[in-house]
Image: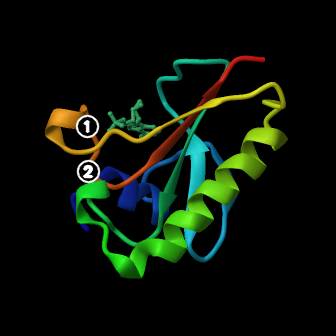
């Protein structure tokens, strides 16, 4: 999506602090962190929000959550962390490319 800021981050058209990347996913630090550690995990395929999920997305969503935990541990959040997915306008979503927030204090 040409006007999507997270698609531009995936395409490296705008900078970000990437902590993990593979063929399916990208994880990077939130530009405005709300905790000691605050990163976002996104699918590389443009999915607008949880409202747009279908059965074909089961595997990518599972991969996002398993990777979220691996990265949280790598980032020093062994004592625990919070995950958050804002969904749609009424769910407080501001960037309309599905993303999972991972937040934790050390
Ligand atoms: P949400 O309300 O769930 O849509 O949150 C969007 C999140 O994206 C916010 O926490 C922003 O701080 C974050 N964000 C917006 N632009 C960028 C960017 N260029 N790099 C990293 N994080 C960003």
Disc 1 on helix, strand or loop? loop
Q: Is residue 24 above or below residue 31?
A: below
In what quadrant of the picture does the N terminus appear?
Answer: bottom left
Q: Position of residue 4 (x, y in %)?
A: 27, 56
- In this image, 66 relative to 76: left or right? left
- In this image, 67 relative to 101: left or right? right
Q: Is residue 71 above or below residue 32?
A: below
Disc 2 on helix, strand or loop? loop
Name the residue carrying label 2.
Answer: 96
Q: Is mark 1 within 8 Å of ligand 1?
A: yes
Q: Is residue 49 visible?
A: no
Name the residue carrying label 1.
Answer: 94
Q: Is residue 59 above or below residue 11?
A: below
In which quarter of the view is residue 85 placed? top left
Which residue is painted at 42% across and 58% down in the image? 13
Q: Residue furthest bottom?
A: 56
Q: Is mark 2 within 8 Å of ligand 1?
A: yes
Q: Position of residue 14 (x, y in %)?
A: 44, 51
Q: Residue furthest left?
A: 89
- In this image, 57 relative to 38: left or right? left
As measured in the structure, the alpha-carbon distance from the residue carrying label 1 to the one carrying label 2 is: 6 Å
Which residue is painted at 53% across and 75% down in the image? 59
Q: Position of residue 38 (x, y in %)?
A: 59, 30
In which quarter of the view is residue 26 placed? bottom right
Q: Position of residue 8 (x, y in %)?
A: 38, 58
Which residue is painted at 36% across and 54% down in the image? 98
Q: Where is ligand 1, by quadrant? A: top left
């Amino acid at each position: 999506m040409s006007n999507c800021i997270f698609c531009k981050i995936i395409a490296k058209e705008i900078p970000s602090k990437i902590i993990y990347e593979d063929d399916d996913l990208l994880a990077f630090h939130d530009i405005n962190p709300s905790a000691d550690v605050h990163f976002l995990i996104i699918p590389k395929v443009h999915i607008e929000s949880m409202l747009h999920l279908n059965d074909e997305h089961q595997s990518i969503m599972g991969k996002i959550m398993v990777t979220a935990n691996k990265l949280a541990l790598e980032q020093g959040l062994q004592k625990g962390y919070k995950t958050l997915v804002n969904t749609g306008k009424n769910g407080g979503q501001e960037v309309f490319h599905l993303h999972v927030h991972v937040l934790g204090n050390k």
